Amino acid sequence: MYIVQIASECAPVIKAGGLGDVVYGLSRELENRGNCVELILPMYDCMRYDHIWGLHEAYRDLWVPWYGGAIHCSVFCGWVHGRVCFFIQPHSGDNFFNRGHYYGATDDYMRFAFFSKAALEFLLKSNKRPDIIHCHDWQTGLVPVLLYEIYQHQGMGNQRVCYTIHNFKHQGIGGADILWATGLNREAYYFHYDRLRDNFNPFAINLMKGGIVYSNYVNTVSPHHAWEARFADVGYGLGHTLEIYQNKFGGILNGVDYNLWNPESDNHIAQQYSIETIADKAKNKQALRNRLLLQDVNKPIVAYIGRLDQQKGVHLVHHAIYYALNRGAQFVLLGSATEPSINNWFWHEKHFLNNNPDVHLELSFNEELAHLIYAGADMMVVPSNYEPCGLTQLISLKYGTVPIVRGVGGLVSTVFDRDHDTNKPLEKRNGYVFYQTDPQALESAMERAIGLWYQYPKEFEQLVQQGMEYDYSWKNPGKQYLNVYDYIKCV
Ligand code: ADP
């Protein structure tokens, strides 16, 4: 099968979070299964060019229709750790992708509408006719709309779209100008609740809703979150739309790319190890302490890696730092915040804790350091308010770092409480789960984990090994996506 992924991220060249990991990992798995996979991405100025091999201009004069005129683009091609990627580079005063960051501009809505249009125009003009176009999140929600309303009449009638939603919170909401910009034009037609009109703001277009309405199949990244999005409030207003399209909506759990995330072959860590050589994990703990100037004492290291925002339960992350320190543990945090108030808060904490030899807060995005933390820490807290899938707990399990998670979304489907999960036999339990959002709930789970580490080290090691035995690779999800593709190819 010929599959084209259209996305705003692909790890490690463009990565703001889990979306990048998923786009890369899934593409690799699909290719390993004998499919032809290509990726179309924006050519950001700030992406990691050191992860692209053989970058060259592949299509010189791509004119993308825009507001009745056209924007001149070049398309570059290169290999990102074996994957063939096409990068769209517009030459216009808008400087859509030369902003020094991936997201967070006031015209993000326009930037990614342009990207969606340009990606389809590139497929059309370069005579690429994939069986499946797989797009991701609000940034590419317009792709199936444009395909169905415009491009299928220009020779792309056989392409089918799978649309994956990684986070319902960001939906791409804006005005009708986008219709005129992309050539959809008929304002009254699209400003209808059956199409792109936002369910709550009657004056706004919702790109994610467009993606849901027009795609052949829609999924989010865990079955439990698919349920939550329909029936709880984490669908952020799209629950009703998902209800209408329930027959083409489901949940497929993300995988982890064990070629990139594997303690047996990881080049970013001090000492590679496996379940059989688990004692070597301690050398990474030592290396982590050396690197972050933590004192070398007999204490567990609790870690947090992730974006610092409301979704991730920042108030609980903050609480976890002080609880760990009071309970005789060390704490390492690697995170970055886009919201100024949260950013200031954590910088303040960093200065306040600066001289404490048991804690380090690294407020940046650092892929290499993340590897060493996964390998060197004993426990990982993931106290999210909501979590569509969550990769940090899956990577932690692979690295023998015991996850302590809040029981929501994909976390509840992948972490099984050592003491209380009666649905799993003892030898299949792999971490700690708490449910409420108050600090006491987090404390009780951390207390059980830290207590086991101190009082029953053999049992703790057993728990570590049980976690490492889980297979959360792309093997299973890859098969499920292929089933979806096969199914929609026939509709
Ligand atoms: P989300 O997609 O909501 O950000 P996920 O748990 O699905 O969360 O994926 C997060 C991914 O981003 C993981 O691979 C994690 O290691 C990585 N990550 C998050 N924050 C950082 C950071 N500050 N530095 C390095 N990697 C990070």
Image (cartoon, helix red, strand yellow):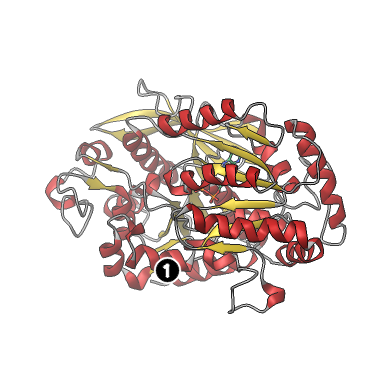
Of 117 and 441, the residue lying toward us? 441
State the image quarter where residue 184 is shown: top left
Q: Quadrant of the C terminus?
A: bottom left
Q: Is residue 383 above or below residue 285?
A: below
For label 1, being within 8 Å of ligand 1 is answered no
Q: Is residue 289 above or below residue 430?
A: above
The image shows residue 397 at horizontal and vertical percentages of: 68, 58
Say whether residue 472 is visible.
yes
Q: Residues within 10 Å of mark 1 (few under 14, many from 20)?
A: many
Residue at image position (67%, 79%) is 425
Image region (quadrant) for ligand 1: top right
Of 30 and 291, the residue lying toward us? 291
Of 224 and 191, the residue lying toward us? 224
Q: Residue furthest top?
A: 93
Q: Is residue 79 above or below residue 431?
A: above
Residue at image position (52%, 53%) is 383
Residue that numbered label 1 is attached to:
250
The image shows residue 86 at horizontal and vertical percentages of: 53, 40
Q: Residue furthest left?
A: 188
The image shows residue 395 at horizontal and vertical percentages of: 66, 54
State the image quarter where residue 459 is shown: bottom right
Q: Is residue 375 left or right of residue 278?
A: left
Q: Residue furthest front?
A: 326
Q: Quadrant of the N terminus?
A: bottom right
Residue at image position (81%, 41%) is 297
Of 58 and 349, the residue lying toward us? 349
Q: Tag 1: residue type?
A: Gly
Q: Is residue 491 left or right of residue 379?
A: left
The image shows residue 106 at horizontal and vertical percentages of: 32, 30
Q: How many marks?
A: 1
Say whether residue 53 is visible.
no
Tell me the SS state at disc 1. strand
